[in-house]
Amino acid sequence: QVDLVESGGGLVQAEDSLSLSCSVSGVLFKSVGLAWFRQAPGKEREFVAASAHFGGVTWYHKSVKGRFTISRDNNKNILYLQMNSLKPEDTARYYCAKLSTYDENGNFSPNNVRFWGQGTQVTVSS
């Protein structure tokens, strides 16, 4: 049973920073790809960032590239998302996910994800 538990969400102002964490259990953490997705009210869930289990490879959605950083601690089994220069349009519920496959172009679809966390809410006020 794969278990993913997110934390770190909250209410911040535009240009603030926030760090999300995802504690992962039930799987060999260092051998799996992991990602962050988000879903705003009335919108589809979308890819934010992904971390491969090899070579420190990462992918980012173009809307967050340069502002967000995904990282992982293979000793603590935790996935992180450091979010800087937050914008109101970043407001969403953020979900941690275990990837089933990789897309070299970074086109990760939520339809290909089998395991999700419960999500953590991020709200950015203007």
Image (spheres, rainbow, N blue to C red):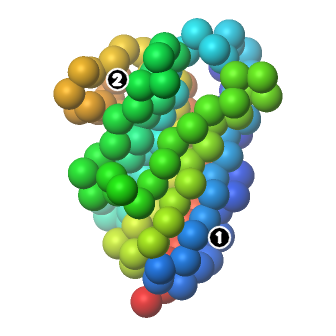
> With 111 as the anchor, is 58 left or right in this view?
right
> With 29 as the anchor, is 58 left or right in this view?
left
Does 98 appear above or below 94?
above
Residue topped by disc 1: 10
Residue topped by disc 2: 112
Q: Tell me residue 106's x, y (percent).
A: 26, 31
Q: Tell me residue 97's x, y (percent).
A: 52, 32
> With 8 as the anchor, is 56 left or right in this view?
left
Does 103 appear above or below 7?
above
Quadrant hosting residue 73: top right
Query: Looking at the image, is mark 1 or mark 2 earlier in the sequence?
Result: 1
Identify the residue shown where x is 35% and y is 72%: 89
Identify the residue shown where x is 40% and y is 78%: 88
Q: Which mark is residue 75?
A: none
Quadrant hosting residue 101: top left
In the image, 53 versus 23, the foreground residue is 53
Does 47 appear above or below 122?
above
Residue type marked 1: Gly
In the image, 88 versus 111, the foreground residue is 88
Residue 118 seen in the current view: no
Does 54 appear above or below 58?
above
Q: Tell me residue 78's x, y (percent).
A: 70, 33
Q: Nearer the viewer, mark 1 or mark 2?
A: 1
> Dot 1 lies on which element?
strand
Quadrant where the image shows the N terminus: top right
Q: Tell me residue 114's x, y (percent).
A: 47, 22
Identify the residue shown where x is 42% and y is 15%: 100
